[in-house]
Amino acid sequence: MYRLCIFLLLFGIWIIFSGQFDGFHITLGILSTAFITAISSNFFFENRSHGVANRLHQIIRIPWYLVWMLYQIWLSNIHILRLALSPIGMPEVEPKLVRIKTNLKTDFGRWMLANSITLTPGTITIDIKDDELLIHSISNLTTEGVEGDDMERKIAAIFERETTN
C-alpha cells in the first residue's frame, strides 16, 4: 500500500508537469514513476509508523519552510551580490571549511538540511558523515548563517515530531 501511494504521488506530479495525455507519454510516465518508486520508495517517509496527523502536519509545514527558505536565499543573494560588486567587499571574503554537528536523526532530515545549505548562495555542503556536515562558506556572514540552528530547527519541526497515531 505504501509503495502504491508513492507511485500515485509521483505519477500525479508527472502528469501535472508533463501536460501530455497521449498513450506514449502516459506509458512513459507509468514506467518511469514505477522505476523511481522501486529504487527510492524507502527514502520517502522513512518512518512509516507516523499517523495521518503527522503526515498532514508535514504537508502543511513544508510550504512555510519553502517560503522561509526562499527569503533566506534572497538575503544571501543580496549579500553575495554586495561582495561581488563592492570594491570594499573583498576583505569580507574569507572562504573557510566549517564542520557542524546536527541533531537531526533521520537521513531525510539531514539530506534536507544539506540541500538547504547548498541552495543558499555562498555555502555548499561538501560531505555528510553520520551527524556531521562539512560545509564551504565564502564569508563570515555566511558562516554565521550555517552555524546558526534556525534551518535545523525548522526542518526538525517538520520531520522529527513525536509520533501521534
Image: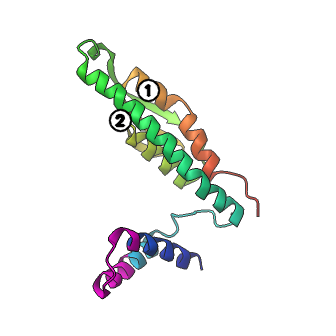
**Which of the 4 image quarters holds residue 87?**
top left
Where 140 sits versus 135, above or below?
above
Q: Is residue 79 left or right of residue 50?
A: left
The answer to which of 68 and 6 lies nearer the viewer is 68
Where 84 sits versus 61, above or below?
above
Residue at screen point 48% across, 29% down: 145
Q: CA distance from mark 1 to mark 2?
A: 11 Å
Point out residue 84 in the picture as x, y percentages from the top left corner.
25, 24
Where 93 sits versus 97, above or below?
above
Point out residue 28 in the picture as x, y percentages from the top left corner.
32, 81
Q: From the viewer's perspective, is the residue at label 1 or at label 2 nearer?
A: 2
Residue at screen point 54% across, 46% down: 65
Q: How many dots with numbers?
A: 2
Residue type beneath disc 1:
Thr
Q: Secondary structure at mark 1?
A: helix
Q: Quadrant of the N terminus?
A: bottom right
Residue bearing mark 1: 143
What range is drawn magenta here? 15-32
Q: Residue furthest bottom?
A: 23
Q: Is residue 10 visible?
A: yes
Residue at screen point 34% across, 85% down: 27
